[in-house]
Image (cartoon, rainbow, N blue to C red):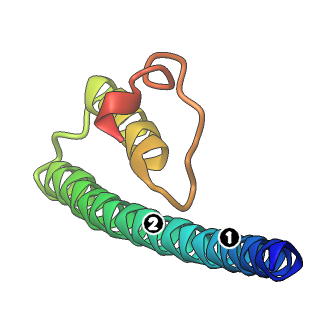
Amino acid sequence: MELLKAKKQIEERIEREIWHREYQKQKQIEEAQKARAQEEVDKFKLLKTNAKRWKETVEIRNYIQAVETNAINTNTLTTELQDWIIWANQKADWNDPIIQKEDEYFNNASHWK
């Protein structure tokens, strides 16, 4: 009788160990899937952010071009305005997620990106 009881306890312990290993394995798979899903969400958010920055940069460049064209057409393209155009284009290049030009003043302004 004691031998049967001992054998049953051993079988139950083995079953618990097998169940625990399978549970841990499944838990790891679920955690990996959850991490991958979060990574995908984060990458998509970055994609949206960069698309918005790119669109904004296109608008900035269009504005700069319009200012320059107007100044040329009205014969008011001064040295000061030319300097502004260069400055504005440099800031547009910094804001552009494709170019990402370094900027002495804006590089630490990550809250703008």
Q: Position of residue 3 (x, y in %)?
A: 89, 77
Q: Quadrant of residue 46?
A: bottom left
With 2 as the anchor, is 76 left or right in this view?
A: left
Q: Are marks 1 and 2 in contact (CB under 8 Å)?
A: no
Secondary structure found at label 1: helix
| 107, above or below 23, in the image | above
**Of 89 and 10, the residue lying toward us:** 10
Task: Residue at 48% x, 48% y: name it.
Answer: 93
Neighbourhood count class around disc 2 (C-alpha, 10 Å): few under 14, some 14–19, many 20 upward = few
Q: Nearer the viewer, mark 1 or mark 2?
A: 1
Instruction: Please give the label number shown on residue 50.
Output: none
**Of 75 and 85, the residue lying toward us:** 85
Instruction: Please give the label number shown on residue 38.
Output: 2
Neighbourhood count class around disc 1 (C-alpha, 10 Å): few under 14, some 14–19, many 20 upward = few
Question: What amino acid is at disc 2?
Answer: Gln
Task: Residue at 18% x, 56% y: name it.
Answer: 63
Please state, as top left, top right, bottom left or bottom right, where the N terminus lies in the image: bottom right
Report the residue marked by disc 1. 20
Question: What amino acid is at disc 1?
Answer: His
Q: Quadrant of residue 61?
A: bottom left
**Of 92 and 33, the residue lying toward us:** 33
Task: Residue at 17% x, 48% y: name it.
Answer: 71
Secondary structure found at label 2: helix
Query: Along the polypeptide, which appears first: circle 1 or circle 2?
Result: 1
**Of 102 and 87, the residue lying toward us:** 102
